[in-house]
Amino acid sequence: MLTGRESLIRLIGKRRRYLPNRHSILSTPISESQSFLTVSDERNGGEGSSCSNAVASDWVTCPVCHNNIRGDDRTINSHLDNCLARGTKRKLSQRTLLDLNFSREFNKSEHTEGIIVQTSHENDVCGTRNNSGDSVAEESTSLECKMHTIRDYILNTPASSSEENPVLNGKLNYIASSPSISPQISRPQSAESVDDIYGYNLMTSIVARRFCDKVELNPGEAISLMRDPSNAKDPNAIKVLVEDPESTKTVGFLPRDLAQYLSPLMDKFGLCFEGSITYVPDRALAAIPVQIVCCKKILVGEKECEDNQLFNSLWKHVLNVVEIEKTCPNNIKYQHNFVLMLQEVLRTNPHLITADEKTFLESFLSLSDDGQRLFVRLYTRKGPWFRLVNISYNEILDCRLAAKELSVAGYVCLIESKDDIHKDDLEEVLNMLAVGDLREIISTMNKNSKHGGSRKQDLIALLTSTCEDKLCAIFEKTGVCIRISPKAESLVWRVERLFFLNGELDLSTFLLVDMGIIKYPTYNCIISDQIFSSRDDLLSYEEAIEVAQIMDQALEENNRDLILRCIDLSDSRIQASTVRIHESSLVPFFSRFSSSWVYSKVVLLGVSFLEQENRYIEAIRLLKRLLLNFTSDKRRGYWTLRLSIDLEHLGRPNESLTIAEKGLLDPWVRAGTRISLQRRVLRLGKPPRRWKTPSFSESVQRKITEVHVQGRPLNCVTGTKSRFYGEDGEQCGVEQLALQYYAGEGGGWQGIHAESGVWLTIFGLLMWDIIFTDMPNVFRNLYQVLASCMYYFLYKTAPLDMDTDSFYESRKSLIESLLEKVQNGMAEEILITSWESHFGTACRGVKWDNHSLSDLRAIVTCIGGPCLASICRHLAQDYRSWSNGMPDLLLWRFHGDYNGEAKLVEVKGPRDRLSEQQRAWLLFLMDAGFNAEICKVRPLL
């Protein structure tokens, strides 16, 4: 993958179906004075120059992906390698993710803590996400893995130990405050004593059936409840039992959020519950609705609990949970969450939305429940077109009526007759049909099906070129079709972007919170400045995102002309906005939400593309423009390094050396790139080019201690990860082999292979209160995730300025005060307090499941206060530059009860080489007083 491609994909997020500015973007003229392509190609030579003169006859069709590519051998071989490595996307027959997420098979996990927000209501909500393909029945293999991840996570999520639940304190029901949106939840009936609840019916359900006895159940069958305090997943668990002729069987459990309050009533007040099954769903493992009633009371121990205040509080909570579940069942919460997001954006960003757009978006609130639910369902699916006959959701009473309502409101487009099939939509409409349906349509046209080939795309191509008079046959196969309208898609995309502030979050974030997969920390949103000061800034940013998406699609399709067009356009837009880049009054860490920042990522990806094409002159010109226009950017180090390397490629070592030397004077050139430039200066700056030895020569060329370990190799293939037989005879990687060496003859060390992970976890735990301290503008909403640290199901909350110098500068007094305590030996105490107070809560860098508290305590004890403080200060001052590249192994051993030592080891296999970032870390650690070394693993001779 080209450098910068992955970062651009994260920036784009979910690809938009419609790009409203695509035509103007591709047709906007670029003056020759601004175009980087005006530079002469005469010095490029080789393939780089010849490719610019390629003509149509030089292009061929790839036999794998059927895209057009240039016909030279190098391009064909490279493209085929990529295609074959990518493989074929296999699809599976299963429910959509949306259906699975809200299936009653899933037991609701505990709710997250309420987030204190000064600019909006306090809420915790749940939602949905769907990555489905064109059909409800088709999903990709990656989606199945995600669903298993959800399932596994839920089954291993411990129950909340907190007695306060935000749902029960009114924080969840934000939507319920608007009568036009959601019915009001009535106040639950209270109980002054145990006697008041006898005979009170509670409607709930049996969940987690897949982990219990398989018993055939019938409506009206009697059930009883039993506490299960030894349950490893939930100490509040309540089992549901049925009487079998042979024995008592466990058929499932009560939902966790209900059991959290019902279990103390059973334990402390001796209540017993019985009930019956309301009905049995068709799905084998679906949740089963039941009705339970308090039937009797037994004594608990020697003395009966008489705390009526506690009893009344628990009973109110039980009724609240039951009432909320009744009013807002799982399968419609996505509707409420969508409305929440819509209302919040309309409230907080009125200056960015026109009166017409506001009227259109507010009209959504007046739609029927069916209309709202159908729109959200369709929006979260891939599409764009769907056959109405295939759309069926349990919570939508009449999909056809809802589709009509949405069409009238302008939220969807319908094909209700052959006359509604537009030529531009024909290919997408045909793509909904199966191959057999396409062949039947072709046969009605008296065409020999063999002319259409066997591939679906060949059949569609034949139909689109010859079927204008056969639209009736096509409509007979498709029936009524529906899609999200371009206007609705564009505005809702904008709403999501403004709410989540990046492209990787969507409605699924709400769902993950509700399921307990994400627990957000408590923090204050203090908003004093707007990210987008005007509508023009927002529109410019959106257009830049469109250019980025076009660039990504062009790379995927290997459309070289379009790639160059996107690079040229992005470069020209940066030139046009130079004044704004230098004179912007934005908060510094808001720069990532500017169009210029997005264009710079497109240009950087373009540099990688041009370097791959050996077009170094154009790459050099783009890099120089980036360095000229972005004077305060941490990417300057990488840009300077690439500029120096490309100049050397062109046989201009003197200029390459000069650029490297100037780069070392740049305060924004840091970490690994600084080491790289220093080493380049030493290599290129030998006499007669330079006679004076640089002052950093001795520091950079310091000898790092090396240890050599031998092992029996399992593979010796270049390009693959080295594998060895460990001391126990099992297969392992070089890191595990090194751990075995250090545990034995290497000194009796304990250790882990964690690279940066353990350090970032320690940093996050020690700095927790500082990370989430009250600072203006760093937290914007309830579900803030820093885009640069996004991974599916590993959402990590962080302030917006964490990757900038502003993080340390604005909190310097707090950070230095904490580091003084760390240096004085209080790190373990701070670590324990933070772990116990925040366990399981999302924070950038903290990986709760990867490290135990006992290991972390041992590590901070053995490292010692001064060394630990120096690392934390380093990360606080420049988290982005130093949050990767740390040594592979962290080793420690004790000398007595409270004294120990630590060692950091970078492990390298037979074909590995130390990166400059790794070298930078090792040199820093040596300066900070750490015992650091390199372990080189070699095969036995």
Image: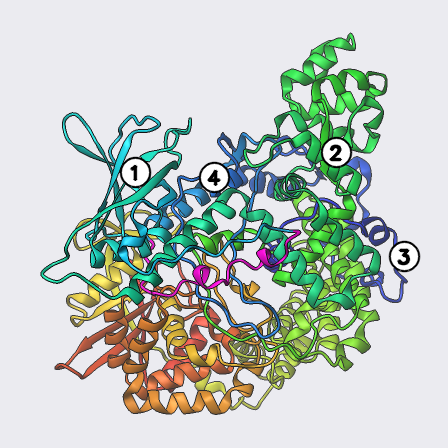
| Marks 4,2: beta carbons within 8 A | no
- In primary-sequence order, the first of circles 2 and 3 is 3
- In primary-sequence order, the first of circles 4 and 2 is 4
Q: In this view, does 307 lie to the left or right of 755?
A: left
Calculate the distance from the C-alpha at mark 1 to the C-alpha at mark 4.
28 Å
> Which residue corresponds to mark 3?
29
10 Å neighbourhood of mark 2: few (<14), some, or many (≥20)?
some
Q: Is residue 335 visible?
A: yes
Q: Magenta span has 354?
A: no
Identify the residue at horizontal 74%, vertical 39% (top origin).
406
> Which residue corresponds to mark 1?
275
Residue type, mark 3 in image: Pro
Viewer-nearest residue: 941 or 474:
474
Residue type, mark 4 in image: Leu
Residue type, mark 1 in image: Gly
> Which residue corresponds to mark 4?
100
Identify the residue at horizontal 27%, vertical 32% (top origin).
222
Secondary structure of the residue carrying tag 1 is: strand
- In primary-sequence order, the first of circles 4 and 3 is 3
Viewer-nearest residue: 47 or 169:
169
